[in-house]
């Protein structure tokens, strides 16, 4: 079972505790970069946070199952807001909104694939 599926399953079980978990997850994965060199790493951490927050939000829904495409749609606007300042800092300007949005969707899908390639208890899994 991938990490995000395990996270969602665990959060459905604990239900009411989700409100306590969400701020903890946010503080772990959304730290602000301390130097300009950390800009990309900081954006990556924030995107990880968005993906995890979407999973947490979906886990709070009772008797509702969202598709991956619906979860992706939830994450896109926030990830766009993370990436625009990074691109500006790098001196880049978005000239094709359609391609930019498609690229953002690919970034999110890539982060989801990375998280799903992980096990929820890394101590029990042999590293590749």
Image (tube, grey):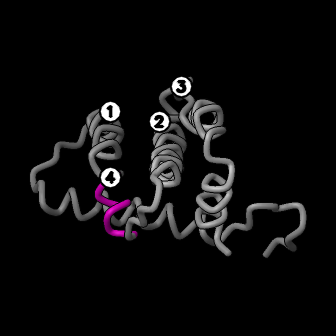
* Left or right, 52 with reference to 64: right
Above or below, comparing residue 124 to residue 43 in the picture: below
Determine which residue is flagged by label 2. Answer: 39
Prevailing SS of the magenta stretch: helix
Q: Give the mark, 2 or 1, whose residue is nearer the N terminus.
A: 2
Mark 3 or mark 1, earlier in chain: 3
Q: Mark 1 touching mark 4, by CB under 8 A?
A: no
Q: Is residue 71 visible?
A: yes
| Residue 82 picture quarter | top left
Q: Position of residue 104 (x, y in %)?
A: 31, 57
Q: Is residue 65 above or below residue 79?
A: below
- Residue 106 shows which numbered tag? none
Residue 69: quarter of image: bottom left
Q: Are marks 2 and 1 in contact (CB under 8 Å)?
A: yes
Disc 4 target residue? 74
In the rendered structure, which segment of residues is drawn in magenta? 68-74
Q: Which residue is identified by label 1?
A: 89
How far from the left and from the top, in percent, is residue 91?
Answer: 26, 37
């Amino acid at each position: 079972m991938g990490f995000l599926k395990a996270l969602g399953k665990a959060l459905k079980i604990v239900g009411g505790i989700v409100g306590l978990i969400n701020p903890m997850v946010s503080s772990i994965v959304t730290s602000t970069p301390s130097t300009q060199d950390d800009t990309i790493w900081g954006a990556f951490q924030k995107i990880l946070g968005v993906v995890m927050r979407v999973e947490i939000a979906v886990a709070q829904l009772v008797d509702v199952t969202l598709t991956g495409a619906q979860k992706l749609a939830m994450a896109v606007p926030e990830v766009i807001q993370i990436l625009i300042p990074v691109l500006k800092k790098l001196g880049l300007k978005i000239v094709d909104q359609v391609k930019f949005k498609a690229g953002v969707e690919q970034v999110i899908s890539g982060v989801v694939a990375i998280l799903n390639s992980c096990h929820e208890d890394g101590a029990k899994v042999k590293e590749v």
